[in-house]
Every structure is written in structure tokens, then in C-alpha cells.
Image: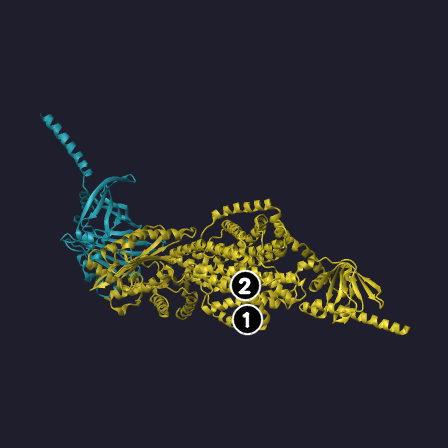
């Protein structure tokens, strides 16, 4: 049968991958010190090479999905109308129009024109002024050199405020704030472009600073530079802070001094290797990857804590200090779980790579590499270090005792609550989950880079000032395209353009729009002696042709193509909430459909827009990565315990914090952004570690302790210290992120910290309650179990069961060892249980009335005795004694029912066999009765 | 004695004639400019021009126009430019009356405006004309009295020797309204014809270059260029003018053409 064959093969494979392999891996470092040392050093040296290649990237492209459908339209628009990368220089003074200030601005404007990447400088010195003054037409630049004459200055100021092209674009309503708009065509191959350009502008603004009350530059270069500053600050601050926290927690919880130095080594090497990797592979430092060192320190320390705790237990049990032996003990106890948890954590980070946003994908790759590197470093370096300089004393409580100190208080409380209020706990949890689940529906997505910053960041404040006085710094283009040349010389089409522009203005959410309509309306008005009635598009084609003569190509190149086939409306706004922007754009698209005929095709494009559109992928990306993680973890756990139920069980305590977190986000209005979107999968990947530790501890305790409740208690007590220590230090570590310049990073920190706390509570309160409903057995234990196959296969108890099932049953039941002559069943006592011999031999003897013993038979592996006791206590009619060292498996109804409750296949087979044995026994008894009756 | 006098006379002739040649070398800037004006200025001139405007993207716009020039009895020039192609700009006209002691009068006519011409403000001289790379002040002859001309060392270009002169406005009024701090002119020494002008803005930065090519001797010492190109480095724009036909006859530029009524009545486009 193919299935059984597969199982056999699976078994053989498992036999290879068993605990001892993990143990070997974990003690490698202590057994081969020199090799390990050389390995560590060489990889580190190699990493330096990658480190040198490491780059910083704060560009907008990293925030935009490469699949965004808007790219081609955007590129075409930029080609037709020029770049939308505009830096606005904001200059404000009470006495702005003083000649010396105007002179300084003139100098600035001309110096700007000389800068190579500058495509266009728009200012009061370049803008075309068209004005009718008492019948005389003025037409030309508003200013070309700074005027001196106060009358002239006043006239110019007046003209500026009067011009619709100037007002709220280059000059504020009160005339005290002036802007210079510098458009650059960015060299996409130059990663330093924004930083260099920003620096050049800052240099130019230097001499002006003393002369203006308020002066700043704002635009994409500054945004990128601010992101860069923020993330370098994060790197410099968070890393040492987290390191300090981790060291202090270990000192507090583990009470050992030396050991606190170990995380320094493992984290340091992991970070070095990760940066080396990033350098070689071309993943840059971004505002997300900048927090990786802090994450490595915090998360990596959890493994170190587990290892140290078991090492200390190992030392504790020794008469004479033997570090290598303690390391071996550690490896046996936590080796396998640590490898598994390293994988789940790493995978948690990795699942974020499904995102289409490059920023998030890069973070996923770099962070999962960091976790894997940390695992390798930990496996090799920690045993190496411990075997040389590990602590010699253990100040922790013994495993079966309740821990002391802070942990003791927590564990004690947990035990009381879990024991007495088990049901209430579950109900309260369920209610909270429903409530927060509903709150989670309120969560909104946001991806605007301005929203990455904290509200008190100077960049955000300046953006608000700008939008208040002039117009927002966010720009997008609305382009109308026609197939016909000169389409937009026709008044009909210009009227449509006018209607579109009016629709946009009526939406009331944007700060300003400018288009060809404004230019033509201006001329129309002024040629009609300034009559406001005429501030509209002219009605005849002739007028349009003539009016256009008033402009140089350079004046209108941003608003219409040379062939007049396409026109462009430049829209400026200050919305930094993706949700709001996307909503308004959708309304705009609908409006356009109503205004425009099919031959005029609209395009709404801008870098700004694509970034905000990427926001919409955050949500689905999050869901995808979480699903992927859950599926993966489920499969791992189910495979480890050969039980889908175990897989399911491991997810429950970890989905609780997920739901809690989404609920918290919905409740407090924390949006889903590149920071918070990555949290879930990461948090689950980490939170599950504690559950895995608990499960594995429980599984191994179950083999010695038949009472599942007791087993769960012991498991919790043993794991309490490391679990609490790691959760609290993780929570603290994540919460340091709150101090980041970036709102998205601090939100990430808050949520992750909250998840750690929720997960801790779930693991301490909910997991034990779930675990004690079921016995679980690790497949490696099954694989490692040595049994007498031929004998057991023949055993009536194990009829029709595969070797795998037999082993599993044995492990799920209670196995006992008896030495020579030790009594297993005593005649005349009232006991329950049925037994089957696993190894060794037992003899069945009956004591006669005289006290003489008669041996009835000798039983070997696979043979069953005491089966009548299966259903309940009975009076034993014979004594069963071990002949040599014997292992027996004992079963009773209650225990079996509980243990096998979730293994129905095994249970049904077992019950079937037992009933067969019992009925055979009954038949035998009947036969004896008949025979004896016959005799008598 | 006679031989003595003859020798002196001969030497004097030689000396004087060479001095004449030397005199040309020692002409001042102003003198050169006067000579240019002498040779090249005509009291009556009529041109039919086709113009091609090229923007930084390479897109072009074509125009056809007629240019009328007439020198009045008071020595002041009057100019009329009329567009006749494309249809959209037919009839658009610019009328300029040069004045010695005060600002020039300039009037713009847009047919869609009906019967009136719009006066252009005095500061507007330095503005570009109708989307071309010529400014209003480029289109009229300069009043030499208002400039200071500095002669620079000659340059040889394409085997030809050229005078090089820097022209800067001296007149206070002019200095305030002109768009140029200075211009540099290259004048062909053999024919006293300006073949190249570099323009510098009020801050002394280079704006554009005008080149005259396909020179033809049209009448006596008077030459004209068939092709004039302005390459505007600052705006990244080009204007190329080709003269399709030309006349110096007075009848082609009657004085009534230079009255507002000529334009506003629409006669100018017939």
C-alpha cells in the first residue's frame, strides 16, 4: 500500500533528523573551538567587504510599486510637460519688498538658473505679467532685476497680487511671503542627487537667512534628506539603547553577569554579516532597514536567554563544573526548539517579501537574512563562548519549584487565574476578540511620505506653513490628450478644460490649480481693459491664436504641448493621508467622465499619486504575508507532532495578539503604513517562539508525567523565566522605537511591543489551558524510540497498526521501567491498568494459600497482561514481576481516552484491539469454566 | 628742386594713402558704427519674411510676415510688422514710431480686438516679441548717440577679418529700460556689415546670439543677409528668419502705412 510505504520512508527520514542532530549542531562550537572561531572570523572579514558597498536610499521609487500602472503615463507626462520634482523656496518677511531683500532674491534666482540639474526657475523675476494700465498694455516679466524706486516696487507688488498666475503660487495673499519654485530633472542613476541638490540650495540660502524672518526649502530633496537624517538618528540611538535594555533584562532575570556579554557578541556579528550581505546584494539602508540592528539585538537575545537559562540549569545539576557538559545539556534541552523558532521568526520576516512596495520587500529580505545569520552565529558562537567562559553558578530556582522573584509573582498569579478562572479567562478573551475584531474594521491605509514623520517634525510644520500661505508642496498633473493637432486651440476644447479645472477647484480639497486657461483668461481680461467679466476662455479660435502670441514657449510649456494636442493642469495640494487623497481622486475621475467626450483622454499622474496608490497594496500585502506565515507555521507544527490538531492549537494563542493589534490600530486610529504593515507577520513569527517552547517542554514532560494538568504546570514553570524575560525585553526593546523621528517606526514599535505583551498573556493563560486537553508527541521522539519491532508488531494490542502508530501510542501512554524482581502487579491488591511488555521479560506468578509461588508464564515484548484492569480497579489474581530490566506500557480507560482524544485513528484501532483481547480473555475464561465444570 | 618736390609729393601721396588705410585700422567704435549705418541704412525698405520658431524639444512653429521701414523727414524711422500666416495670426501688427528725445511709441494690433491698437508700455521694449527670440528693441535701429561703443581687437573668422565692438547704453533712460547691459558686435571689415551679435542681460550674462548669413550685395555698398538666425541659449529657443523678397522702393512703403488707421481699418492685410 503506497501510504504505508510513504510513512515508512518518512519515518526513516525522520530518524535522520532527530534530536541528536540538533544536539550535534549545538555542541559543534564547544567541541571544535578552533574551527568555529576561524569560521566566524572569516565570514566577518568577508562581510567587511560588503559593508563598504552599502548604500543609503531614501528615494521615492522605493515607495512605489514597480507594477504600478501609472508609470508609463507618468513618464509620458514628464516628457511632455517637464518634471514634477519641484523644490519650493519659501521666503517671508514683514518688509519683504525692501530693495535690499529683492536684490538678494534676484541674486538667488540667477544663481539657481546656473545649477546644472535645474530645468526651470519660476519666480517673480520670471513670471509673465500682463496688465492693462489705463489702456496701455504691459506684457513681460514682472521683474527682471530688483527695482530700487519705491513707487516702482509698489506698482510691481500690486501687479503681482493682481495676477492669477502669481497669487498663492509665488506670492501670498498678504504679499509678505514669496516663493521661488525650482524644478529639477533628477538623474535617476545618481543616488546622491537629492542630498547634493539639497545641500547646494542650503548653501545658497545661507546668506539670506539673516535677512528674512522665515526662510526654508521644501520638496522631494528635503524630504529625502529628512528621511535620511531620521534613519541615521534611529540607527545611532536605538541600537545602543536596545543593547542596554537587553543587557539589563538578562542581568535582572538570569542573575548572571558574564552572560550579559554574550548577546553583544552574537548581535554584533549578526549585524555585521547582515550589512555585509546587504552591501553585496544591493539592498540599501532605508528607514525600515535602519531598525534591523535594533531588532537583531532584541530578538537575537531571546535565543541567548533560552540557551543561558538551560545552561545554568545544567551547571546547577553538576557536582563539579564541567562547562562542556552543561553545554551538552543545553543543546539537548533547547537545541531543537531554538532551531525551529529561529526558522519561524525568520520566516515571519520573510513573508513580507510578497509586498510590491520595494521598501517593504527590501526590509523583508534583509531582516530575514539577519535572523538566519543570528541563528548561525548563535549556534556556533554561544556554545564556543559558554564552554570557555560560561558562568559557573546558577542562581535560578529549580525547574519543578515555582520560580522566585518577579517571575515567581507572575507565574503564581498566572497559575491561580488559569486554575480557578480558566473558563472566565476564555470568555473574557473571546469577548475582547470580538470587540477588537470590530474595531479592526476601521483601520485605514496610508502611504504618504509626509505622514512618515512625527507631527512635530520641522518638515511637517514647514509643509503646513507653506500650504497655509501659498499652496501645498504635493503636486500632480491632470493631462488631457487629443489625437487632433491644435485641438487645444479650439475654444470648445478649452472650455472643457475650463470646466475640468473648475470641477477640481470646486472639490475644495486642493490648494491651487494652474493651466493654460489661466493664461488665456488673463490676456482676455487685460485686453478688455481689466474687465473681470472677461476673465474666461475666449470664444473664438482667432482670439485664442492671437492671445497665445503674448506668451513665449517657455511661459506655457508646462501647460500645453507645442502641437497643442495635450494640455496639463498642475494641481497643488497638501493632503498627506492616502485614504483621503485616493477618495478625492476617485471622485475626480467620475467627474471627468461626465465632462469629457471620449476623444479627450484624461490622465492623472504624479509620483505623489503612485506612492499613495501603493498604500492600497499594503493591506493585501499584509494579509498575504500573514496567511503565508500561518500556513507555514501550521505545517511545521503539524509535521513535528504528526498532528494537525497540534498545528491548529499552536496558532490560537498567537492569533489572539494579532486580532488585538488590529483592534488597537482601529481603536486609536493608527493607520496601516509601511511600518505597521510589516508588524503583524513579524510579531506572530516571534510570539510563536514562546508557544513552541511551551509545547515542546510540555511534550517532553508528558512522557514522564501522566497527569496532563501537572505536566502543563511543570512546563509553564520551567519555561516561565525565559518566556517572561524574553517577552518583556522584547516589549521594551520594541518600545524604544517610539522615540524615532518617524511616526511609522514608532507605531511599529508600539504595536510590536503591545503584541509581545498580549502574546505573553496568551501563552501564559491560554496555551496551558489548551495544551492540557491533549497529549502531544514530537515526531523525533517517535523516530528516536527504540522498540522491538517484530515482537510489538505481533502484539495483540498493536494488531493492524503501523510501526509509527505503535511508537506514537507508546509515547502517548505511560511507559515505566522496572528492574529485576521489581513488582509490577501485586496479587490481592486493587489496581487498574492494562500492561504490555515493551522490552525485557516478566513472570506471572500465583501465590497459593500456603504462600508458595507458582509461575504461570513468562511474558516477553508485545505480550499483554492485566488487561481486565483496563476498565477499572479490580482485585488482582496474580503477581507480575520483572525478570530483568523491563519496560512496560500501562493503559487505563480514562488516561487513554484523554490522551488519545485527538488521535481518533489510533484510539479506534486500540479500542478495537483491546476489545478483541478482552473478548478472547472472556472466551478463555468461559472455556476454563466449562472445562472445570466438565471436570467437576 | 622740382625733383625734390616731386619726391616729397610722391612720398606724401604714398604716405597719405597708406594713412588712409591706416586710418581704417584706427577707426573708433563709433566711427565704425557710423560707417556701417552709412552703408547699410536705407530710408525705405520692404521685406517679406518667413520665420521658424524652434523650442527646446525641437517642435517648430512657422510664420510669415511683412516688414515695412520708412525714414521720416525728421530723420526718425517708422516700422510696421504685419503677420499674414498662419491664418490664426493674420493681421496681427506692430507699429513703432521712433523718437529722438523721448520714448519710442509702440502699438500692438490684434484683429480680434476690433478697431483699436493697444499701446505698449514703455518698459516693455525689452520683452520678447510675439514668442520670437527678438525683443521689441531688437527690431528697430539703435540711436547711436545713446550708446558707447568700445572697439576691441579684430578677429578673423572663416578667413575674414572682423571688427569687434562692445556696445553699451549710455543714455540714462535707455539704461533703465533696455534688456541688455551690453552687446558685442562682429562687423565684417571689408563690407562693414554686422554679421554677428552677442546679447548680454542686465546682469551681464550671455543670453543669445544673432547671426546674419547668405550675404548679398543688393545695391552699391549696401548688403543684406538672406538668413538671420537667433540662437537663444538662455531660453533654449531658436528663431530663424529667411527673407523671401525685398524692395527699397519708396512706393512700397508709403507714409500712410505707418498710421494707426492703416492698420485698424484692416487695409494692412489686403
Residue A77, image x, y percentages: 40, 59
The chain that hosts pointer 2 is A
Location of residue A626 by image quarter: bottom right
Residue lying furthest left in this view?
Answer: B1
Residue B11, image x, y percentages: 15, 30
What's the coloring here? by chain
- Looking at the image, which is closer to me, B71 or A599? A599
**Element type at marker 2?**
helix
Mark found first going from the N terminus, 2 or 1: 1
Q: Is residue A159 left or right of residue A317?
A: left
- Looking at the image, which is closer to me, A883 or A217? A883
Numbered label attached to residue A16: none
Q: Is residue A491 left or right of residue A60?
A: left
Residue B237, image x, y percentages: 32, 53
Residue lying furthest front in this view?
Answer: A850
User: Label 2, on which residue?
Assistant: A626
Q: Residues within 10 Å of mark 2 (few under 14, many from 20)?
A: many
User: Label 1, on which residue?
Assistant: A429
Amino acid at each position: 500500500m503506497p501510504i504505508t510505504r510513504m510513512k515508512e520512508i518518512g519515518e526513516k527520514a525522520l530518524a535522520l533528523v532527530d534530536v541528536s542532530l540538533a544536539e550535534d549542531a549545538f555542541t559543534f562550537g564547544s567541541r571544535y573551538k578552533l574551527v568555529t572561531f576561524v569560521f566566524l572570523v572569516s565570514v566577518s572579514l568577508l562581510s567587511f567587504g560588503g559593508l563598504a558597498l552599502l548604500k543609503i536610499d531614501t528615494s521615492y521609487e522605493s515607495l512605489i510599486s514597480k507594477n504600478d500602472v501609472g508609470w508609463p503615463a507618468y513618464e509620458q507626462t514628464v516628457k511632455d510637460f517637464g518634471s514634477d520634482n519641484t523644490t519650493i523656496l519659501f521666503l517671508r518677511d514683514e518688509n519683504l519688498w525692501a530693495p535690499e531683500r529683492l536684490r538678494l532674491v534676484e541674486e538667488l534666482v540667477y544663481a539657481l538658473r546656473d545649477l546644472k540639474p535645474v530645468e526651470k526657475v519660476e519666480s517673480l523675476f520670471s513670471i509673465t505679467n500682463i496688465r492693462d494700465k489705463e489702456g496701455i498694455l504691459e506684457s513681460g516679466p514682472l521683474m527682471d532685476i530688483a527695482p530700487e524706486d519705491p513707487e516702482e516696487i509698489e506698482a510691481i507688488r500690486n501687479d503681482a497680487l493682481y495676477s492669477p498666475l502669481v497669487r498663492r503660487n509665488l506670492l501670498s495673499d498678504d504679499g509678505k511671503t514669496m516663493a521661488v519654485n525650482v524644478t529639477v530633472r533628477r538623474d535617476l542613476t545618481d543616488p546622491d542627487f537629492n542630498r547634493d541638490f539639497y545641500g547646494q540650495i542650503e548653501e545658497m540660502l545661507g546668506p539670506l537667512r539673516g535677512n528674512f524672518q522665515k526662510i526654508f526649502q521644501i520638496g522631494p530633496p528635503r524630504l529625502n534628506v529628512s528621511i535620511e537624517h531620521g534613519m541615521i538618528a534611529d540607527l545611532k540611538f536605538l541600537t545602543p539603547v536596545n543593547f542596554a535594555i537587553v543587557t539589563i533584562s538578562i542581568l535582572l532575570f538570569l542573575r548572571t553577569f558574564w552572560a550579559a556579554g554574550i548577546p553583544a557578541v552574537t548581535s554584533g556579528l549578526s549585524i555585521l554579516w547582515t550589512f555585509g550581505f546587504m552591501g553585496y546584494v544591493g539592498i540599501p539602508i532605508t528607514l525600515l532597514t535602519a531598525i534591523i540592528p535594533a531588532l537583531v539585538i532584541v530578538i537575537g537575545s531571546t535565543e541567548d536567554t533560552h540557551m543561558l537559562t538551560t545552561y545554568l540549569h545544567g551547571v546547577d545539576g553538576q557536582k563539579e563544573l564541567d562547562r562542556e557538559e552543561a553545554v551538552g545539556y543545553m543543546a539537548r534541552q533547547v537545541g531543537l526548539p531554538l532551531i525551529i523558532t529561529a526558522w519561524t521568526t525568520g520566516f515571519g520576516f520573510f513573508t513580507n517579501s510578497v509586498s510590491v512596495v520595494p521598501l517593504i520587500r527590501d526590509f523583508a529580505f534583509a531582516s530575514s537574512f539577519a535572523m538566519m545569520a543570528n541563528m548561525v552565529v548563535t549556534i556556533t558562537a554561544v556554545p564556543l563562548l559558554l564552554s570557555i567562559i560560561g558562568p559557573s553558578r546558577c542562581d535560578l530556582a529549580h525547574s519543578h519549584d515555582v520560580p522566585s522573584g518577579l517571575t515567581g509573582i507572575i507565574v503564581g498569579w498566572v497559575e491561580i487565574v488559569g486554575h480557578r478562572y480558566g473558563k472566565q479567562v476564555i470568555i473574557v478573551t473571546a469577548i475582547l476578540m470580538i470587540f477588537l475584531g470590530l474595531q479592526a474594521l476601521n483601520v485605514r491605509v496610508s502611504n504618504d511620505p509626509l505622514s512618515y514623520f512625527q507631527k512635530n517634525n520641522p518638515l511637517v510644520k514647514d509643509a503646513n506653513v507653506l500650504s497655509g500661505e501659498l499652496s501645498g508642496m504635493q503636486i500632480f498633473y491632470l493631462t488631457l490628450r487629443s489625437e487632433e493637432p491644435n485641438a487645444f486651440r479650439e475654444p470648445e476644447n478649452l472650455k472643457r478644460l475650463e470646466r475640468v479645472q473648475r470641477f477640481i477647484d470646486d472639490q475644495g480639497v486642493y490648494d491651487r490649480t494652474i493651466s493654460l486657461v489661466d493664461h488665456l483668461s488673463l490676456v482676455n481680461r487685460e485686453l478688455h481693459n481689466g474687465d473681470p467679466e472677461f476673465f474666461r476662455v475666449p470664444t473664438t479660435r482667432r482670439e485664442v491664436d492671437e492671445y497665445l502670441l503674448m506668451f513665449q514657449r517657455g511661459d506655457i510649456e508646462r501647460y500645453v504641448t507645442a502641437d497643442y494636442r495635450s494640455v496639463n493642469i498642475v494641481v497643488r495640494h497638501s493632503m498627506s493621508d492616502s485614504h483621503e487623497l485616493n477618495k478625492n481622486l476617485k471622485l475626480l475621475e467620475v467627474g471627468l467622465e461626465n465632462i469629457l467626450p471620449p476623444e479627450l483622454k484624461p490622465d492623472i499622474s504624479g509620483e505623489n499619486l503612485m506612492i499613495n496608490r501603493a498604500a492600497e497594496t499594503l493591506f493585501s500585502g499584509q494579509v498575504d504575508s500573514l496567511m503565508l506565515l500561518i500556513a507555514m507555521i501550521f505545517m511545521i507544527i503539524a509535521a513535528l507532532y504528526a498532528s494537525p490538531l497540534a498545528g491548529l492549537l499552536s496558532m490560537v494563542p498567537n492569533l489572539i495578539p494579532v486580532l488585538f493589534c488590529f483592534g488597537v490600530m482601529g481603536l486609536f486610529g493608527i493607520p496601516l503604513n509601511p511600518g505597521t504593515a510589516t508588524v503583524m507577520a513579524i510579531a506572530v513569527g516571534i510570539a510563536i517562539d514562546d508557544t513552541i517552547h511551551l509545547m515542546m517542554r510540555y511534550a517532553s514532560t508528558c512522557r514522564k508525567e501522566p497527569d496532563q494538568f501537572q505536566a502543563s504546570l511543570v512546563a509553564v514553570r520551567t519555561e516561565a523565566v525565559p518566556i517572561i524575560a524574553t517577552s518583556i525585553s522584547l516589549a521594551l526593546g520594541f518600545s524604544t522605537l517610539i522615540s524615532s523621528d518617524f511616526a511609522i517606526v514608532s507605531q511599529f514599535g508600539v504595536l510590536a511591543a503591545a503584541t509581545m505583551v498580549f502574546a505573553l498573556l496568551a501563552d501564559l493563560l491560554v496555551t496551558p489551558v489548551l495544551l492540557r486537553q491533549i497529549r502531544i508527541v514530537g515526531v523525533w521522539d517517535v523516530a528516536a524510540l527504540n522498540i522491538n519491532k517484530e515482537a510489538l508488531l505481533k502484539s495483540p494490542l498493536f494488531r493492524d497498526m503501523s510501526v509509527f502508530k505503535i511508537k506514537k501510542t507508546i509515547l502517548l501512554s505511560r511507559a515505566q521501567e522496572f528492574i529485576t524482581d521489581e513488582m509490577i502487579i501485586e496479587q490481592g491488591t486493587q489496581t487498574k491498568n492494562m500492561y504490555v511488555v515493551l522490552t525485557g521479560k516478566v513472570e506471572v506468578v500465583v501465590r497459593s494459600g500456603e504462600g508458595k509461588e507458582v509461575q504461570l508464564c513468562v511474558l516477553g515484548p508485545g505480550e499483554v497482561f492485566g488487561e481486565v484492569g483496563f476498565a477499572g480497579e479490580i482485585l488482582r489474581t496474580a503477581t507480575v514481576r520483572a525478570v530483568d530490566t523491563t519496560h512496560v506500557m500501562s493503559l487505563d480507560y480514562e488516561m487513554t481516552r484523554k490522551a488519545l482524544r485527538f488521535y481518533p485513528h489510533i484510539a479506534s484501532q486500540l479500542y478495537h484491539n483491546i476489545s478483541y483481547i478482552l473478548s478472547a480473555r472472556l472466551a478463555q475464561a468461559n472455556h476454563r469454566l466449562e472445562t472445570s465444570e466438565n471436570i467437576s | 628742386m622740382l625733383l625734390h618736390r616731386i619726391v616729397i609729393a610722391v612720398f606724401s601721396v604714398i604716405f597719405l594713402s597708406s594713412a588712409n588705410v591706416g586710418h581704417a585700422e584706427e577707426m573708433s567704435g563709433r566711427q565704425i558704427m557710423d560707417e556701417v549705418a552709412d552703408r547699410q541704412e536705407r530710408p525705405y525698405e520692404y521685406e517679406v519674411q518667413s520665420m521658424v520658431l524652434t523650442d527646446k524639444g525641437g517642435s517648430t512653429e512657422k510664420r510669415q510676415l511683412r516688414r515695412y521701414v520708412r525714414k521720416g523727414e525728421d530723420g526718425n524711422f517708422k516700422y510696421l510688422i504685419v503677420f499674414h500666416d498662419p491664418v490664426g495670426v493674420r493681421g496681427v501688427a506692430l507699429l513703432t514710431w521712433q523718437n529722438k528725445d523721448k520714448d519710442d511709441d509702440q502699438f500692438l494690433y490684434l484683429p480680434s480686438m476690433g478697431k483699436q491698437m493697444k499701446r505698449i508700455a514703455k518698459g516693455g521694449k525689452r520683452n520678447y516679441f510675439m514668442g520670437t527670440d527678438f525683443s521689441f528693441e531688437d527690431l528697430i535701429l539703435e540711436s547711436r548717440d545713446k550708446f558707447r561703443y568700445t572697439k576691441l581687437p579684430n578677429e578673423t573668422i572663416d578667413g575674414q577679418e572682423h571688427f569687434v565692438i562692445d556696445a553699451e547704453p549710455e543714455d540714462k533712460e535707455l539704461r533703465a529700460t533696455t534688456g541688455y547691459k551690453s552687446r558685442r558686435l562682429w562687423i565684417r571689415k571689408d563690407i562693414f556689415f554686422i554679421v554677428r551679435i552677442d546679447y548680454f542681460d542686465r546682469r551681464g550674462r550671455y543670453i543669445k546670439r544673432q547671426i546674419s548669413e547668405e550675404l548679398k550685395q543688393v545695391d552699391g555698398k549696401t548688403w543684406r543677409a538672406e538668413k538671420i538666425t537667433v540662437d537663444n541659449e538662455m531660453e533654449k529657443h531658436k528663431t530663424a528668419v529667411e527673407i523671401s523678397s525685398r524692395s527699397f522702393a519708396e512706393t512700397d512703403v508709403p507714409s500712410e502705412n505707418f498710421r494707426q488707421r492703416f492698420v485698424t481699418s484692416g487695409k494692412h492685410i489686403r
